[in-house]
């Protein structure tokens, strides 16, 4: 039993910090009690604002999103109505259709995170290990998709057809490797 209200309050603060630390990407550490934090630690302790999905399928980034994240979303929006085409987006950036990794590559190219498209297998080794704050790419040898500002960018899972689309629902990522761009 705690001896005083101040001990109880200190215990709650410590528990809250542990919850925040458990939510941080692999390798990140921060003491989120508000004292002596670096700018990067403050960023990691602040929840990521979620984008807004319009009825027409376009995603609007949060105002607080970094410019590179906004450009990733803008590039993804450009191809959000294209059809699924196996190998699409790998021979050239602007294509008549895109496959899973082609559409993720195109979006990442918008934020200057890729200079050439990657197939899904090599995406398992791209960037940094673990989930990012703004952008996470999930890849395995047969499929790739991304979660950007809280929305899934994927070529599967849409009742309105196949091709690159934004999705509100997330998917089971147990069979995927999570990667993210450094700092995002």
Image (tube, rainbow, N blue to C red):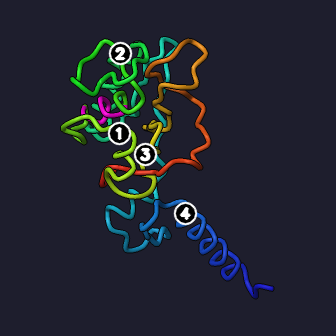
* Residue 128 drawn at (x, y percent): 34, 56
Q: Is residue 91 left or right of residue 51?
A: left
Instruction: Tell me which secondary structure the magenta stretch mostly adopts.
Output: helix
Q: Return the disc, 1 or 2, that comes first in the chain's sequence.
A: 1
Circle 4: is it few (<14), some (14-19), or many (20+) Cα within 10 Å? some
| Residue closest to the eye, 41 or 116 | 116
Circle 1: is it few (<14), some (14-19), or many (20+) Cα within 10 Å? some
Mark 4 touches mark 3? (CB < 8 Å): no
Label drawn at residue 136? 3
Q: Return the disc, 4 or 2, that comes first in the chain's sequence.
A: 4
In the rendered image, residue 119 lying in the magenta stretch gets the answer no
Q: Is residue 45 above or below residue 92?
A: below
* Residue 96 drawn at (x, y percent): 31, 12
Q: CA distance from mark 4 to mark 2?
A: 40 Å
Q: Return the disc, 3 or 1, that comes first in the chain's sequence.
A: 1
Return the residue at label 4: 20
Residue 147 visible from this viewpoint? no
Quadrant in which the N terminus appears? bottom right
Which of the two discs, 1 and 2, sits closer to the camera?
2
Report the span colored magenta. 104-109
Which of the two discs, 4 and 3, sits closer to the camera?
3
């Amino acid at each position: 039993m705690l001896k005083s209200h101040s001990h109880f309050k200190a215990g709650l603060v410590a528990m809250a910090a542990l919850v925040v630390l458990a939510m941080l990407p692999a390798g990140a550490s921060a003491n989120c009690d508000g004292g002596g934090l670096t700018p990067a630690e403050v960023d990691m302790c602040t929840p990521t604002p979620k984008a807004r999905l319009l009825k027409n399928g376009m995603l609007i980034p949060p105002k607080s999103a970094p410019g590179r994240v906004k450009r990733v979303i803008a590039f993804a929006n450009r191809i959000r109505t294209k059809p699924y085409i196996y190998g699409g987006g790998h021979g050239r950036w602007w294509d008549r259709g895109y496959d899973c990794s082609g559409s993720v590559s195109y979006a990442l190219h918008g934020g200057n995170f890729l200079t050439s498209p990657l197939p899904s297998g090599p995406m398992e080794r791209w960037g940094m290990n673990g989930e990012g704050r703004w952008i996470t790419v999930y890849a395995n040898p047969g499929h790739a998709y991304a979660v950007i500002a809280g929305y899934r960018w994927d070529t599967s899972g849409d009742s309105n057809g196949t091709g690159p689309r934004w999705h509100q629902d997330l998917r089971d990522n147990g069979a995927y490797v999570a990667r993210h761009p450094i700092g995002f």
